[in-house]
Amino acid sequence: MPYSIGLIPGDGIGTEVIPEGVRVLEALAAWFGFDLQITDYPYSCAYYLEHGTMMPEAAFEALKQHDAILLGAVGDPRRVPDHVSLRGLLVPLRQRFDLYINLRPARPLPGLPTPLKGNPAFDIVFVRENSEGEYAGAGGRLRQGTPDEVALQTTVFTRKGVERAVRYAFDLAIKRQKRLANATKSNAMQYAFVMWDEVVAEVAREYPDVEVTRYHADALAAMLVRDPTRLDVVVASNLIGDLLTDLAGALQGSLGLPASANLNPERTYPSLFEPVHGSAPDIAGQGIANPIATYWAVGLMLEFLGEAAAARALMQAVEAVTAEGRVLTPDLGGTARTGEVTRAVLEKLEEVEA
């Protein structure tokens, strides 16, 4: 029985890095003895400009048939407003497929410098509530374009939504260092985040072995820069998690490195995996995009599908390439092209397999 994978290369460098991810995925399938059935979908800003929608309604039913989805990037800001592209593809997939966990690992890779003094060896996993909160899409605009215009954007926290994300984070903390950081803003948002903190406290009573620390989100952002080694598992709302994880990605040394998993833990729907660098229109078409985030996304996907050995081998190969420092793209201080990094990783995979 093959794994059925839906591909959405998307826009910009997404169309360059996703084929590289497929190359390593197919090599791993051959070496570790699993089969793949891959279907490519054209949904993107280019599709929007031609059809007036980022993807048709029928796309949800088609994508639902897959075991997982691999997404490249969404965005063409010169031609399509970002709120149109994001809310036309990625956000609907997260909400319709109940991808309520966004999992973001953040750690430096061997041989790569970070912007932090001393290159501290942090290893953090962020658990971001991914389907509601600040990105629920509730709100509207009144008297648009007039001096009396009003814009309302309503944060929506449900007890169910908060609790399931928080519980996932506690379960992860138990498997790691038994430390959980709760990123909150209950000092300023006295309803939504007070409820969030209450749910964290209630769930914490079921996990007496986990040390829980509550941080205001701004203080936690400062800690990420000062001493990220103090953090292990971080749980956060949709918006706060979005901001903190991009900061953590920058602290890894490049946004060409981090990947994210959009998970439906119950597997009622396919989970979605993506590099987080976006479409990067400034370098699209030049063949210099960093494919490491895509490899990492492939690794997260393989781990979720149950191919943990293949996922480990992939990350070992990636880390061997970065440790050598010979084949790196320009964002990491090198001169390699995208395909050259893939060839180097495939060579290391052969060594790992041997």
Image (cartoon, grey):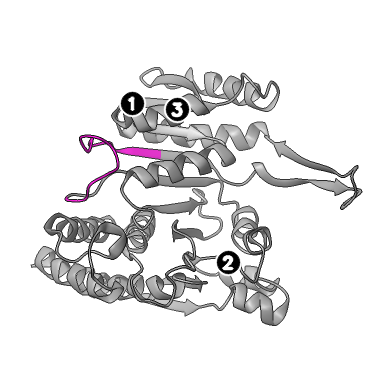
Q: Are marks 3 and 2 in contact (CB under 8 Å)?
A: no
Q: Is residue 163 magenta?
A: no
Which range of residues does the magenta coloring cover? 111-125
Disc 1 marks which amino acid? Lys
Left or right of residue 237: residue 213? left
Residue at 60%, 20% in the rendered image: 198
Q: Are marks 1 and 2 in contact (CB under 8 Å)?
A: no
Q: Quadrant of the C terminus?
A: bottom left
Of the pair 62 and 87, the residue shown nearer to us: 87
Say what secondary structure mark 3 lies in.
helix
Mark 1, Cα crowd under 10 Å, few <14 / some 14-19 / many 20+, is: some
Question: Quarter-wise, where is residue 329 in the image?
Answer: bottom left
Q: Earlier in the sequence, mark 3 or mark 2?
A: 2
- Reading the image, the residue beneath label 3 is 220
Residue carrying label 2: 64
**Which label sits on residue 260?**
none
Q: Nearer the viewer, residue 156 or 308?
A: 156
- Residue 31: x and y in percent read 20, 72
Q: At x 20% / y 74%, what residue is drawn? A: 343
Q: Where does label 1 land, which residue?
A: 178
Q: Residue at x 23, y 55 (%)?
A: 312
